[in-house]
Image (spheres, coloured by chain):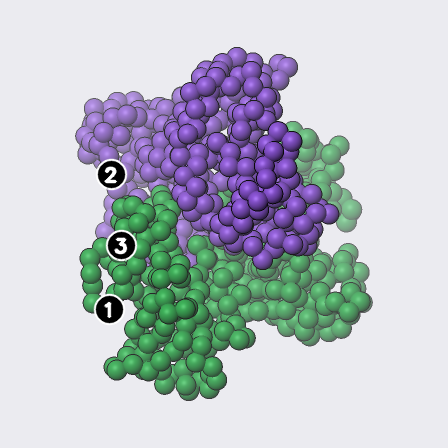
Amino acid sequence: MAHVRLDKISKKFGSHTALINLDLDIADGQFFVLLGPTGAGKTTTLRLIAGLDAPTSGGISIAEQDVSGWSAAERDVALVFQYYSLYPHYTVRQNLEFPLKSKVRRMSQQDIDHRIAKASKTLRIEHLLERKTDRLSGGEMQRVSIGRAIVREPRVFLMDEPLSNLDAKLRELLRSELKDLQMKLGATFLYVTHDQVEAMSMGDQVGVLNQGRIIQVGTPQQIYNQPHDTFVATFVGSPAMNLLQADVRGGRAVVLPGKLELPVDQAAGGRAAKLTGPATLGIRSEDVMVGVNEAVEARVHGVENQGVEKVVTLRVQDCLMKATVPARLELSIDSVVRFSFKQEKLHFFEPGSGNNLFYGEEKRNG
Amino acid sequence: MADIVLRDVEKYFGDNYIIRKLNLEIRHREFVVLLGPSGCGKTTTLRAIAGLEEIDTGDILIDGVPVQALQAADRDIAFVFQLYALYPHLTAYENIAFPLRAMRESAQTIDKRVMDAAKALKIEHLLRKRPGALSGGDLQRVAIGRALVRRPKALLMDEPIGALDAKLREEMRTELKRLHIENEATTVYVTHDQVEAMSMADKIAIMNDGVLQQVGTPTEVYSHPANLFVAQFIGSPIMNVAKGMVRPGEGSTRIILGDNDATLEFPQKLYPMIVNKKHAEDELTLGIRPEGVQVARNQTAGFVAVEAHIIEPLGPFDIVDLKFGKQMMRARTPSGYVEKAGDVVWAKLDETQTHFFSTRTGESLQIQL
């Protein structure tokens, strides 16, 4: 059992503050993804939990035990890095054996063999056991690195962008495999990435981190459908959510007077009807409807073929928006089209802070 | 004007081919993307066009003229690299103006050309800054500005946005394509990212191991891949592939997946089509994109029962791993359509979106239902 808890963690490196008052609660058996851009503090968080660094203030507990004073080895967590740290001149089997042969463990060779057999079966690397690690492909090496973590049967798996060095196809394959592995093991995973697709597709819970602060924690659906602020709204989802500066009054939003105005009286469960003043409107590309009878006129600024669908950039004066349309729709560059927004899918953010004006309330409306 | 033609181009290093019998035509004003994994020969091809790399056999013609004898500088081609090679001590303006100064253009011409390029790239406000003060995206814009300002016959780009973060890459994709439409320079663009290729190219040339696999519009390579490599390199999530045995059925053609994992029914006319292709083996490889795997929550005629294994919510839709026996296939469903892992649902492969490949050669059998 390994419930992981971070309580008001701060970490400073000299004058640089890497983490500020970080609270994190990872349930036993959960696949938790920490998502954020470079420099957000993701890796620092992992290192603190692993015991490789000590927090400046705050507490860390694993399985309800305060582990602040514990060494990395005592915490019984396993780290998997982006760069597979394998011993190059040893075989896969020797690499897997290594963590089990430590003097502290005193495991019998029989137990070791049993664990290696089990782990290599799970990861489908049985046929590679006698091969030297420098003869492996990238995907195989990453499987072996993960294997080295699995054989220890640690309480928590910590993974630092383990897939980002692999090519797109392999990354996609290993995404499913990792998720499958975590479900089979029933283990607690803390997985760090800057790739929102990885976060969405694997996480039971996703924590979005920016500049050392946790902005939002939720299921992938919550993060996607009810973003806390414009940072989360544009970081999660591809293409990024469209943001438009508007003046809202009497149930109407004016982005460009006379050119781009839209009703918002039904938006946000009717709450937008009472909104007055400047607001940042957010709308995802799949919630922008393109068709001959829609309300607003635009020019086609760009068309991106993405196979199953197209992403069209629409332009109204200097205002650019993306819309997702079916691949069969023929749209030529610079032609005139009409579009509108699905009102119930609009988001409203405060222009200064970027905070979602209806956060929490949006949630209750699903 | 710039038509670029590659004719039987080969390049080898010892016994190893880097490029093998490459034939490619790039028409005036076209935006052609050379796409492939690392080491496939795409960058070598680009450098050969630029004159930065010599070829061993074959011809490269620009506007009908063989250019092997011409130095890079005399080919009137501009090159943009992944790592912006800018002069750190010069302002953005001077960096862009540099090639024109080297050509001894008048101050007036230089100013006009630099300002035109800056306007197209929306970097007018950055012209007085030095590279050290610019972000990655802006640096690349300046580097592109420097390439454009000479008004070259052709613009060659080697993963120009590969080093930028995801969001900026998305913006730059639209901008670069827009720029191409406005300045009409023939563009050859190298990338390993199929999304970039699909979204920007007029024509994609896919390479693997030095061999050109297919040339076509984004729609052609996506909908009619010539072989398994192209099928699985283009598109995300990846096209599902599964081996199957073909059997004539009563009023149908049956395909038995993998190790007797599931039996799928296809139209009767499929069997003679496969026989017609003189496909010696009765084993073939099926390919189907996740959007071609139809899913129903209730039992439906022609659908087979499958177990949902992993559900990946991607926002506007979910990708669901379905177990056809031991064979896994991924389907694209509306968000939340399959509730949870372990649920049993019904699935069918849309025959019009199913691709048939020879297992032995990987080539498409060119059968379209």
Q: Earlier in the sequence, mark 1 or mark 3?
A: 1
Residue A79 placement (x, y as % from top left) = 56, 34
Q: Which residue is mark 2?
A: A343
Report which residue position mark 3 lands on. B344
Q: Chain of mark 3?
A: B
Q: Residue flagged by tag 3: what amino acid is it? A: Val
Which secondary structure, mark 3? strand
- In the image, B338 versus A238, the foreground residue is B338
Q: Who is closer to the viewer here, A238 or B60? A: A238
Question: Mark 2, chain letter?
Answer: A
Q: Which residue lies at the image location 35% right of the left edge and 35% below the top edge?
A: A219
Q: Report the quarter where the C terminus of chain B lies.
A: bottom left
**Mark 2: secondary structure:** helix
Q: Which mark is residue A312?
A: none
Q: Are marks 1 and 3 on the same chain?
A: yes
Q: Colour of chain B?
A: green
Q: Would you name the residue on which mark 1 appears?
A: B302
